[in-house]
Image: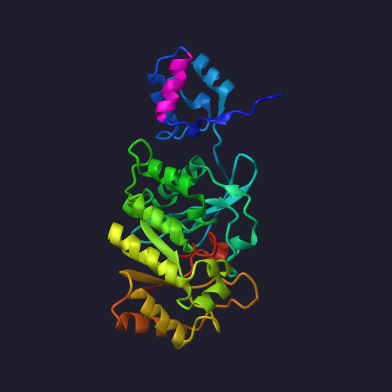
Amino acid sequence: MEIEKKDIRSLTKEQLRDFFEANNQKAFRGNQVYEWLWSKGAHKFEDMTNVSKDLRLFLENHFVINHIQVDTMQRSEDGTVKNAVRLHDGLIVESVLIPTNTRTTACVSSQVGCSLDCNFCATARLKRMRNLEPGEIYDQVVAIDNESKLYHNRPLSNIVFMGMGEPLMNYNNVIKAIDMITSNEGLGMSPKRITVSTSGIPKMIKKMADDEVKFKLAVSLHSAIDEVRAQIMPFSSNFPLKDLRESLEYWYRKTKSKITYEYVVWRGINDSKEAVEALVKFCKYVPCKVNLIEYNPIDDGEFQQASSEAIDLYIKLLEKSGIVAKVRRSRGKDIDAACGQLANKS
């Protein structure tokens, strides 16, 4: 029976050095291989040209590199690029490159499918198959960085975890991926250019604060009225707004980092003056800004885009209270580039 080989990227640099020493090799070989895996993005052991052929064969016999492949790529007229990413086990996730005049943003996935049950989201209709490994998250970013250089003549500037999955339900792997993305041995990106978007899991928001993370936090809020939020996101009945508010206040006390609320306005669901006033009140608890998002309907069901008048009311009352609010228009409509539901922001 063939033993399943371990993905070599699950090893730290120190573990790689120890592996080589344990097999009568020089420890510095671990540094070389580690650089190939992360800084140079090697897909195969044979790519490691400064490692001897015998040693490459030795690695081949012990490990695999479970690298992603961009299965299909679609380019929109507005420059948005949507990747269907095939994983080593044949499963597919999506990632999106979103360009503007001043930046290029990668929207990446953290799970195959999703752990949650947001009624408006296409991804939530997919059963969660598994969490993505740190290398699989990292690879999405590398692929989009390459596309940004190819199609927009500049490197990737920002990353948002707003694709398939709930990042805080795959916390350890997301953190490991971000550590490598921000490491000088990886992509060397500033953590301040990374935003992790959550549907709002209070315990994990507090953990992030305790872990003193340096990236930004966004919360998919969609309503500041518990009953309405539970209609939109049924799982949120387990995490009432009172608990969410407490965790966000804790986050801000520990990090002094402003929160972004992602907020879709739907016709007949959260487009009333009462809904706007509830959001204004919620926004006053913690320094924040609000992204009002244009909705991409996934069918002819109850979730339909609100009127421009409803959006204008949100903007008017938020700004009147001194809260920064922006409307995020949908991107890549001609290729249906929704990474999760909320990838239409720049």
Which residue: 30% across, 81% down?
321
> Is residue 313 in view from this perspective?
yes
- Between 149 and 283, the one lying in front of the other is 283
Q: Residue furthest right?
A: 1
Q: Quadrant of residue 188?
A: top left
As drawn, is 155 to the left or to the right of 75? left
Q: Residue at x 64, y 62 (%)?
A: 125
Indicate whether 318 appears above or below 193: below
- The image quadrant of residue 259 is bottom left
Residue 244, relative to residue 271: is it above or below?
above
Q: Residue furthest top?
A: 24
Q: Quadrant of the C terminus?
A: bottom left
- Residue 98 appears in view: no
In the picture, measured across the screen, residue 139 lies left or right of residue 234, that is left
Image location (x, y in percent) of residue 6: 57, 30
Identity of the residue drawn at 56% across and 26% down: 63
Q: Where does the image place residue 35, in percent across and percent down from the top left?
A: 40, 30
Is 88 drawn above or below residue 64 in the view shown? below
Q: Provide residue 215's location: percent of width, then percent of height.
A: 35, 53
Q: Which residues are magenta?
A: 13-23
Most foreground residue, 67 or 144:
67
